[in-house]
Amino acid sequence: MAGALLAVALPAVLIVGRRASAEDVEGWPREMSGGGYTVVMYQPQLETFEQNEITARAAVSVEGNEVEQPVFGVVWLTAVVETDRDERWVEVLGVRIDRAHFPGADATHERQLADFLELEIPKWDLGMSLDRLLTALNIEEQRQRAAEGLGTDPPVILVRNEPAVLITIDGEPRLEAVEDTDLERVINTPFTILFAPDAATYYLYADTNAWYTAPAIEGPWEMTSSVPAAVDALAPPPPEPEESTEEEEAAEGEEAVGEEEIEVGPPPAIVVATEPTELIVTEGAPEYAPLAGGELLYVSNSSSDVVLEVATGRFFLVLSGRWYASEALEGPWSYLPSDSLPDSFAQIPAESDLGHLRVYVAGT
């Protein structure tokens, strides 16, 4: 849609664009209108200030005529400035648009937008306090340092086509004796894992009257309903039942009438990880459903957000807000910046099953 819009909008805007009105120039966002379309630039985010040049990036939207919703993109710009250190003032003399990106638009239309902005931005009153500028740059520097401290190396990503549960341990298991027993507890995990040295057996609490046992921490784990009394005594207390109103109890009773007995499947497999790990579980072989006009597919029988690009056969996965890509579902996976995603990701419908992914897609 963005490509079609820019093809119509920008030529007209380039011809009859006007300078923002006096009401606009005091703050952000700034508007440029013409030919029935409006281009809006939101407050730029400063990146660097060296000698007489400032680099920044800004969100931009285009809307008008037959377009009900604005199409958003990002521009990267360099501003040539003059600094008056006595007056502590910075004046913008000229602007160069280094790059523009609109999901779905081709390079020609993006360049048209860049040319238009280069003509219009110098007409704005963009003078600013030098101290305010330096403060903004300091904040950006702190943000970049914080971002650099966040690792982008992918965790171990495992795929299972059967029910499975990931048990995480922070490094190699650390055992601590349990007072008044012959048992030891793994203390560097949020799960209840006990070890009986005499029997050389590990016990993993699963639920009331349900434990897993294994000869080694990595498994194989098998479910059992019978464990030594000393082990069972160390099970975490059950959660307190939530109080329900008479209306809720009556509704639950009505739902229970005529309900068919739920078929219980095999117990889930246990996967133990001692390093950062993510587990993708599918109910049987992966199944796919269309997304974004058929350019993307997603794994529909999994709770993980796994997307497949039809044209390239590449898989994409978002973990903790970071994207990873792979040629195969089984990996290997590599980090991918959000602004390097295929343009089709910006077309994921907000109301779709994966609409929540848009928050991690640059330009949406």
Image (cartoon, rainbow, N blue to C red):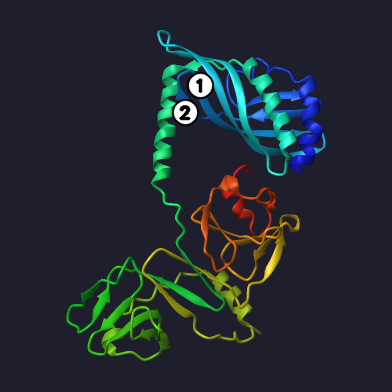
Q: Which residue is mark 2?
A: 48
Q: Residue at x 63, y 72 (%)?
A: 286
Please state if 49 lies on the left or on the right of 60 as rendered.
left
Please state if 320 lies on the left or on the right of 37 as rendered.
left
How far apart, in angstroms, are the residues tagged by discs 2 and 1?
8 Å
Mark nearer the N terminus (2 vs 1): 2
Residue 67 falls in image quadrant: top right
> What amino acid is labelled 2 in the image?
Thr
Mark number displayed over residue 263: none
Q: Which residue is mark 1?
A: 53
Please state if 91 lies on the left or on the right of 67 as rendered.
left
Q: Secondary structure at mark 2?
A: strand
> What amino acid is labelled 1 in the image?
Glu
Q: Eyeballing the image, is 70 above or below 235?
A: above
Residue 234 in view of the camera: no
Q: Position of residue 343 (x, y in %)?
A: 67, 48
Residue 120 falls in image quadrant: top right
Residue 186 in view of the camera: yes
